[in-house]
Each structure stands twice: as C-alpha cells, then as structure tokens.
Image: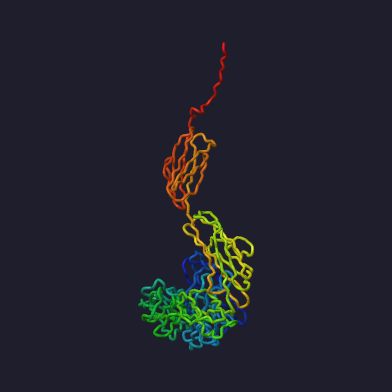
Amino acid sequence: MAKLKINLKSRKFKFIGLVLVLIIAISILGLTLTAPLEDDVEVMPDSDLTYYLQVSYDGVDKYGVEAGDDYTAEVRSGYIYVNDRIPDGLTFKNFITAEDGSVGAVSFKDGTACTGKVVDDSDNDGADPTNYHGLHYDSTTKTVSFKVTNLQAGCYLTVGIVTRTPASVDDPLTPGITEKRRDFYNFATAREDSLTVDSNVVHVWMGSESVEKYKVKYQYTGVVPPNAPAAPKESEYAEGTSVGVANPVEVEGYRFSGWTSVEVIPVGGSFTMPSKDVLFTGQFEKIDSYRVTYEIEGTKPDGYIAPSEKTYYPQSTVTVDQSLKPGDVFNGYRFLGWKIEGSPAEESFSMPTHDVKIVGQFEEVKYTVTYEFYDTVRPPNWEELLPDPQEYRPGETVTLSDVKSIPAGYKFLGWLKDKTFTMPNNDVVVYGEWQIQSGVFRPTITKTIQNKKDVYVADDIVDFEIVVKNTASYAITEVVVRENNENAYFVAGSGYTLSSNRIVTIPSIGVGQSVTLKAQYKVGATDSGTIVNEVEIIGALGPTNYTLDPDGDYKARVSFDVNLQGSINICKTIDGVANDKVFQFKITGPNNFETWLGISGGKCQKIFVDAGTYSVTEILPQEYTLKSVTGDQTSNGGSLTVQSGKTSNVTFTNQFVKKGFYHSYGSKDNIIKANK
C-alpha cells in the first residue's frame, strides 16, 4: 500500500525539537488513491484507511552540525510519548511494523538505520493486534499510544495504523438521523519532558459535498503555559455525525481541566454533532513538583559521590541514574544496585505525587590468589608445599609467597608470574614449576680492572677482565653472564658470544677450566664519586637433573672513582687589524696546576680541569693592547671559579696598535762614503 509523500524540506530548527507528521493512504478494492496532504480526500465506505505517524527529531549538536534532510547530528531524545485518537466512525484493525514487530529509526538522507526505536513494553508475544511490540490501542478511548527512546536528530521512525471506514455514510449509532456526509479529522500529539507538539491535521470524508456542516472549535482559557501546544484546529461535521473529543492536553508542571462545552455533553469521549457550532474550552492549573534523592546505605567507597537531587512533576518520566550498574566495582566496592522502598528500581518510572528516595548499597570486593603446580614434575607431597590462598582488594599490591619447603632431589623453578603485581578485579591462579635435581654446581666469577687509575674523568674507558671458572667435576654449558651496570658493555672475544652488549653466553667450560671475558665502561659526563660495577652469572646448564646451586653467589664487583671535571672555555677576539698571530695564555690553578695555550684571533679553546679557583693570563704581544676581559673572569690574571660539570667562559679582546721600535715601518738605504 503506497503512502502519501510529504515535503519535509522545511524542517529547520535552531533548538532541539520534535516533529510529528501524519500521513494518510487510502485503499479501495485494492486500489490506492493519493492526494496532496493539504487537500481533503474522499474515501469510500468499507475500505482500508491507513495513517502513518512519522516521529522525527531536530537540533544542533555540540559540533555545530544542524540536523536536517541531509545530515544527522549527535543529539538524541529521551522518552517521547505519542498519542493519536482515531476519529469516531473508523474501526482500528492493526499496526504496520517490521517482520519482527520492531519499529526503528532511519535517516532522512539515505534511509540507513539510526539510533531510536519504539520501546517494546508489551507483555505478550505480539499476537494481540492492539498490544503489539510496544504499540498500544485502547478501544475505550479509541487512542493509539507508544513510547520512543534515543531518537537521533536527523532521523525518523514511522508507525502505520490501519483502520477501516464505515460500511455506510449513515451512522447506525444515531437512529432517527440519516447522515448524508461523514467527516474524519485526525491529529496526534507527542511529548518529551516539558515539550509537547501537535502533528498536522489530516481530513477525509464520505458522502455528499453539498451538505451543510457545523464547526467544532477548541480554545484555552485562563493562563496558558508557554510550553503548551496549540489548541486543536477547527474541524467541520454534518449534523448527526458522531465526533470524538480531542484528547486532554499534557503539559509538564500543569494539570489540564479537560475539554468541556456548553453546547454538548460528551459521553465516553464522543458526542453527536448538533445543527450548530460547538466550542470546547480547557484551562491549566499549576501543580507542585516533588524531589528525587539518592543516598548510600552502609559503607560508601572513597571518592564516590551520590547523584544530585532533582525535582520532577507528577507523571514525568524519571530515569534512574545509570552511572553505576549492579555488579560494577568502584574503588574496591561492588555496587549492588538501587532500590525504591525496598524493591529493585527500574531504569525509569513515572513520578508520583510525593518525594521519592532511591537507596543504593555497596559491598567490599576481595578476590583470591591461589597457587598451583604444573603436573609435569611435582614432588610427592606437593599439596603440602603450596602457599595458602590469600584475599586482596582490587588495586592492592600482591607479593607472591614462597613454597613452604623444597624437598631433597627437587628444585623449584619459580612462579610463572611477576613477584609483585596489582590485584585485578578477578580471582588469580598462579602456577609454578618443579625440576628434579640430582646435584648442583657452583662456578666462580671474578672481575678486575686492567687500566687501574686513581681517578677517571668523563669519556675515559675503564677496561675489565672477567674470569668464569667451572669448579664442577663435569663440563657445564650455556653459561650466561650479564653486566648489571647499564653503562658497562661486553666486547668481543674468544670462547663466548655476545647476545647483547650487556649479556654474553659461554657455550661450554670444561672441568677445572675457565673463560676470560672482556668488558668496558665509558665514564659519562654526569658520573661522579665511586662507581660500583657488577657482573653476574644468571644461568648455566649441567648434565641432566644437575642445576646451578640457587644458594650460590654468582656476582663479582669492582669499583673506581670518577671526578666530574669542569671546563674553562677561552675565546680570543681582535678589535682592528686581524691576522693569524697566535696569542699565548697561561692557566694556573690549585695543586700547582699550570698549563699554556695558544689561541688565534677569532678562535676559542676549551680545557677540562678539576673544580677550583683558576687564573687565566694573556702574554700581551708588543703590537697589541688588551682592550677588555669579559665573562666569568673580568681582568687579565684575575680569578676564575670552575664548578664540577659546568663550563666557565672568558673572552679576551685585543686591539691592534702601531708597531714599536723594533718593528718600524719603511726602509733605509745604506750609504758608503769613499775615502778621499
């Protein structure tokens, strides 16, 4: 069955809002008639008349995207309550939904699925056509109702309502009056929180076009809430027609009196149209709001803040806080859920005419660490060797326990988990391994410095010799040695291979034999004081079931002293005529320190010295005068303080002057006078 098309291009809203459109489709003897929505449509008796309620949502999201026909926005509705009163004279037949009974949303742009759906709150499997997967029809009030949730802006969902037109124009419920025309007006309402909107009005009719008709009007009296929907639009009916009164208006924070008229007295929500116009009026009364509060009963975890208090009007939908769900863990406590008057709280409820207290509870969470041994190798009494299980709170630091004892002939290889770890939100089983042990061996390791000095300075290389000796009565293999200082590194040699710059592997060491390893340490710029350098045997293999003695000491250490030096940076500049002349500088310091430097004009030279007070003196050439001394020393031969790890700068500026007596300009010819 085709449905009428409606131009939705004008749907533009600067604020979030509901849009409700009513579309009709008429089928007569299998044919479908369509007409513009703005025009009245004539329908035939005893034919299907389908209403399509189209609910959409518009708005601008936080990214500035405005929903429309071409865009969806990251804005979604709460609960939307929709009501549609079927016009008197039409008979409800069924709803139109998907095969599974669901009603979901699609985008205006391309029809792809969006978030948003009709809430399926039905209590049956959908066999009852009046209570079908969240779509409800009340035959007493002739009202269709359903609830929509999470509808994305720029999307819409459609609910089809199939009705049947009367078998004749004359209404059998009004005996004594023969109707020649029957009119059917329909509009729907949708409400989300304090916002209520009306749909457009659709009108169909049966019978004669020339029959006199009378008007039915609606208007509010008294103070009208600013968020009240427009009063129902005017409609026209022939005398004797059964007319349904518009549904009462629902506005959050107000109680509506209902629609009343002095011209007619409705019975069961309907009245018979008299031969005059009918006016219905209704008014609003402000009502009180009530509080919803949250509190935690019993122990509350540190850092948890209960949801803030809120106020609601009666019949408003209250959504219970879902930031924590039953079973969630917060700072070591498991949330047990919310309760209202001792019963588990639903996700939402209708606000009653009294305050509501929602109570939550937590219980402390602890999980168990247990120990197990793999069954490949286990001592005979292995159950007695397992550490006792222990409980920990999530986030607590767990330190693994040792086995209770180690039987003779076995070696415990350790737990296959870090010695310490942070307890997760679940129980933990730690597994360990055993190995049969027929005997143990203890190789020795020594380390010496080959280029021993009293003090090393930055960039010096310290050379080590490491000797690993097999003391067992059998060969040992795969001996792994590690440098434990990150600045130390092995260098290539014979009898071993480099696995990395800090780990070497010795393939084999015979009985009573030894292998010598070479290593070095480069003194860093920040090294100072006494440096302890350590090397360690971290693994070795023997014959079957012979292992490295776990009680042995396989570390060797040496130490050396590092003096972190400072430096003096001397720069030479020339003011005037520059040349390649080398200027001589004398540097003196503590402990009879003395050295000389030669620096050309425009050059600098740095020397490294121990911390202390120094003096830099320039030997002034005859052709130059000393113009200035700047930096950390301000006079020729003045004092200069050098700190460890820092550079002291001094600049000597000379000025070229006229040459002196011994280096005059020009030349003189020799004159020899002969004797007369």
How many discs appear? 0
Residue found at x 43% / y 80%: 364
Left or right of 475 in this view: 372: left
Q: Nearer the viewer, residue 447 or 433?
A: 447
Q: Is residue 282 in view?
A: no
Q: Nearer the viewer, residue 244 or 567?
A: 567
Image x and y of residue 444, in percent: 56, 68
- Displayed quadrant of residue 215: bottom left
328, above or below 534, in the image:
below
Find residue 587 and report its horizontal and vertical position in percent.
Answer: 47, 43
Residue 127's quadrant in the figure? bottom right
The image quadrant where one finds the N terminus is bottom right
Dividing the picture into quadrants, the one containing residue 167 is bottom right
Residue at position x 63%, y 69% in the image:
509
At which x and y percent is residue 415? 54, 77
Q: Is residue 112 visible?
A: yes
Q: Is residue 348 left or right of residue 286?
A: right
Q: Nearer the viewer, residue 230 or 566?
A: 566
* Closer to the camera in the image, 1 or 584: 584
Q: Which residue, as the protein is rendered here, is positioned at the far top?
A: 676
Relative to residue 151, is residue 579 depicted above or below? above
Query: In the displayed structure, would residue 44 be above or below residue 13?
Result: below
Colour mode? rainbow
Location of the C terminus by quadrant is top right
Give the image location of residue 550, x and y in percent: 54, 74
